[in-house]
Amino acid sequence: MKNAQGATVGERFDPFQRVGIYVPGGTAPLVSTALMTVTLAAAAGVPEIAVMTPADTSGKINDALLYALRYAGATEIYKAGGAQAIAALAYGTATIRPVAKIFGPGNAYVVEAKRQVFGAVAIDLLPGPSEILVLADATANPAWIASDLLAQAEHGKGSQILFVTNSARLLASVEKALREQAAKLARQQHLLEVLERYCILVLVKSLADGVAIANDFAPEHIAIATKEDDALAAQIRTSGAIFLGGYSAVVAGDFVAGPSHTLPTGGAGKSFPGLTVDMFQRRTSIVRLDEKSLRKSLPAIATFSAIEGLDAHGRSAAVRLE
């Protein structure tokens, strides 16, 4: 476009030439994360996509996960996990070349490693252990709420599980449903620790108080199961993703709904959005002036140069018009 002085100004978006993506896979092969991250890099046109994923206890990477990574567009796959995998992507090793930007979710150690290498490389956001906050009123189905809470608790250690309601009866029903449903699920070791240490049920006087808690907590996912879900959602400013209505199971966002499930956690939602294709590109400003637009720009350039005491700045423009 043309600016006020007639110069041509614009932006160019180029894909990063080499990115690293962390895909969790130690206790559960997160095939969905391969599709929610690598696919976006490929769509953005990134030519080199290096993936780090930890092996299972037998030293293998799950076959379905390997296939998904290749199908999604990974050009390199390394059997490595934890903070050391992030370090390898950031600084390189004898066999792994460093990348320009690191993407993907991980446990608390992976998130902290990403935080510490920022500057040496770019990072996407800070997606750590799973989080959910369900905000509900008396109209909500307690069994559905309990199932959403347990689905995110299934991710294990560090997951943050919150239920907020203005109905004491619903809170009691959800608490009962949590116990009943949890007893029938497979990942007992992961579930029991999360329910014991990281699951909080909160009774509030009003849904407005619930909204305040949600905005302060900045959950990765918030599910709103109330009569006025749209009105409440409009007041949520910090969540990674908002799920509206009883039928909007959060797991649909985990697997198939559309937006990437790689979302900010640990309060990072106050300043970071979820993963999008444009994060795999870098923006460059483009500026072209001709004699006429430079002449129109000169008074402003001269004024700024004088105020800031940088006469070489002003001279570099004026000399072209002498």
Image (cartoon, rainbow, N blue to C red):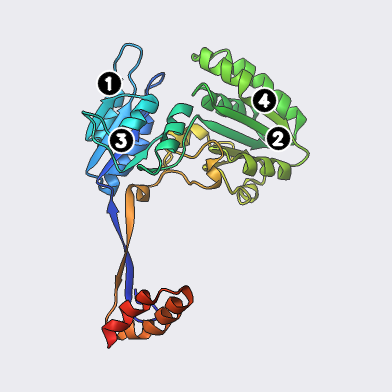
Would residue 230 appear left or right of 189 to someone viewing this image?
right
- How far apart marks 2 and 4 lie (CA) works out to 10 Å
Marks 4 and 1: which is nearer the front? 1
Front: mark 4 or 3: 3
Q: CA distance from mark 4 to mark 1?
A: 37 Å
Q: Which residue is mark 3?
A: 91
Marks 4 and 3, the one that precedes in the sequence? 3
Where disc 4 sits, the SS reads: helix
Three-letter amino acid code of the residue under disc 4: Val
Q: Which mark is residue 174?
A: 4
Q: Which mark is residue 165?
A: 2
Mark 2 vs mark 1, CA separation in Å? 42 Å
| Quadrant in which the N terminus appears | bottom left
Label 1 CA crowd tier, 10 Å (few <14, some 14–19, many 20+) = few
Which mark is nearer the camera, 2 or 3?
A: 3
Q: Compared to 193, does 72 lie above or below?
A: below
In the rendered image, residue 113, in percent from the top left (x then y), is placed at 42, 32
Which residue in the protein does label 1 denote?
A: 63
Point out the image quarter for the C terminus.
Answer: bottom left
Q: In terms of secondary structure, where does tag 1 sit? A: helix
